Image (cartoon, rainbow, N blue to C red):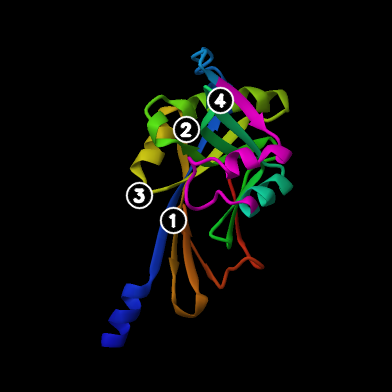
């Protein structure tokens, strides 16, 4: 019994919402931007601007992370105030990989918003909403029509921020890591189990 309880407490669980919005609806918001805020796309050969920025999360902000996403068609949209990069978000078309074993896929005209960050002193100014609206307008010109995002179910701030700009919850992925590498996954309540990893990913297609 003691061994069972010990194993039980070692289990790792996650829960992630999938949120969705039309790019046209997002593009219609925040069309008037404070003149002090400059919105720029950071090209691949300029990624050092983000990598070297003092305002970035500890994870998902190293050179390898950005290089991989640029390889997959990713782009970074940034907000600059007085030559200071204060907020940025990575966008990538058609799919997003989570936890190295799960892939969320959208349609051909879907873009994902991921890896967002705002400097502490710039928070509260709705900069991420401004960046998202700006990106939506540009992606519409490229033929895209839908934005998807994945958010930690227990990160109330992130879920609320996406909901506030009009993104609706369209899915819930709940996963449990068991001993020996077994994973049980509920996608919108439907159970799937397996030994998923980076070579054998579980794929969920968002309708």
Which percent across, then down, holds residue 13?
A: 40, 63
Q: Secondary structure at mark 3?
A: loop
Residue at which label 4 appears: 83
Residue at which label 3 appears: 154
Residue, x 66% and y 68% (percent of image)? Answer: 199
Disc 3 residue crowd, few under 14, some 14–19, many 20+, Cα 10 Å: few
Q: CA distance from mark 4 to mark 1?
A: 47 Å
Nearer to the camera, 16 or 190: 16
Q: Of discs 2 and 4, which sits in the foreground?
A: 4
Above or below, comparing residue 106 to residue 40 in the picture: below
Which percent across, then down, holds residue 83?
A: 56, 25
Residue at which label 1 appears: 189
Is residue 52 a member of the stretch shown in magenta? yes
**Pointer 2 or 1: first along the chain:** 2
* Proximity of marks 2 and 4: CB atoms separated by less than 8 Å: no
Residue at which label 2 appears: 167
Residue, x 61% and y 38% (percent of image)? Answer: 49
Nearer to the camera, 90 or 86: 86
């Amino acid at each position: 019994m003691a061994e069972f309880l010990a194993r039980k407490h070692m289990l790792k669980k996650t829960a992630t919402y999938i949120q969705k919005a039309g790019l046209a609806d997002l593009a219609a918001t925040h069309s008037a931007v404070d003149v002090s805020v400059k919105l720029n796309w950071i090209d691949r050969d300029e990624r050092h601007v983000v990598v070297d920025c003092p305002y970035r999360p500890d994870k998902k902000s190293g050179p390898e992370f950005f290089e991989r996403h640029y390889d997959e068609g990713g782009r970074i949209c940034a907000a600059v105030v007085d030559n200071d990069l204060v907020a940025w978000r990575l966008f990538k078309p058609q799919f997003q990989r989570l936890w190295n074993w799960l892939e969320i896929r959208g349609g051909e005209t879907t873009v994902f918003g991921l890896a967002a960050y705002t400097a502490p002193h710039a928070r509260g100014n709705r900069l991420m909403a401004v960046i998202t609206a700006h990106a939506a307008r540009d992606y519409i010109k490229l033929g895209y029509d839908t934005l998807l995002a994945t958010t930690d179910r227990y990160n109330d701030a992130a879920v609320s921020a996406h909901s506030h700009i009009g993104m609706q919850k369209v899915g819930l992925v709940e996963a449990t890591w068991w001993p020996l590498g077994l994973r049980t996954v509920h996608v919108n309540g439907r159970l799937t189990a397996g030994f998923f990893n980076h070579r054998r990913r579980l794929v969920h297609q968002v309708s």
